[in-house]
Amino acid sequence: MTDETTRFITAADGTRLAWREAGTGRALLLIHGFCSDAQTNWIKYGAAKRLVEAGFRCIMPDLRAHGASDKPHDPAAYPKDILTDDMFALITHLGLTDLDAAGYSLGARTLSRMMARGFRPARAILAGMGLE
């Protein structure tokens, strides 16, 4: 399984975001949890490998301030919905129009905000969000 980090510049503010990709099948956006990254949530314990074997193209970003992505110190770099905006920028950058998505913890909260703002994946998993 490929574990190569790629970077791009977000259109919104220039923050560099990293993501990893594995597989060549149907696109599946996997958004990690708080204080984690793509490597820990999806690669280290084999989830991405199993999904690739099941026929998915796993797209695994490191959220802003996590993993290999930039970690701006200026509070102005964290306006409401910036993680959602970052994920929309990644989807646009990759030219994705039909995909599935899954989020864990903060990733699930980010995915739910994306859906509240009109994102309609064919299938979605929201996991580990807590009770509130």
Image (cartoon, rainbow, N blue to C red):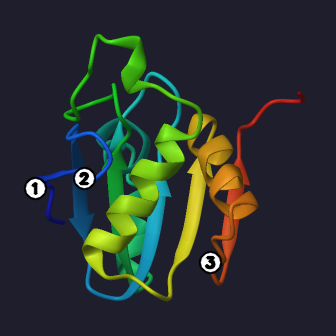
Identify the secondary structure beneath mark 3.
loop
Residue carrying label 1 = 4
Dot 2 amino acid type: Trp
**90 over 66 or under it: above or below:** below
Label 2 – label 3 distance at C-alpha: 19 Å
Q: Position of residue 126 (x, y in %)?
A: 71, 54
Viewer-side label of 1, 2: 2
- The amino acid type of the residue labelled 3 equals Pro
- Residue 47 visible: no
Give left or right: position of 122 versus 7: right
Image quadrant containing the N terminus: bottom left
Vertical position of residue 13 compared to residue 130: above or below: below
Front-most of residues 4 and 116: 116
Q: Residue at x 42, y 68 (%)?
A: 50
Question: Counting residues from the N terminus, which is met first, the one under dot 1 or under dot 2?
Answer: 1
Q: Spatial distance from mark 1 to mark 2, Cα to Cα? A: 8 Å
Disc number for residue 121: 3
Q: Is residue 132 above or below residue 59?
A: above
Q: Whole-percent x and y of residue 99?
A: 50, 81
Q: Picture quarter containing residue 36?
A: top left
Q: Position of residue 84 (x, y in %)?
A: 53, 49
Q: Residues within 10 Å of mark 1 (few under 14, many from 20)?
A: few
> According to the image, label 2 marks what residue?
19
- Within 10 Å of the Cα at label 3, are there few (<14), some (14-19), or many (20+) other Cα atoms? some
Q: From this viewpoint, is residue 119 visible?
A: yes
Residue at figure coordinates x 33%, y 28% from the top left:
66
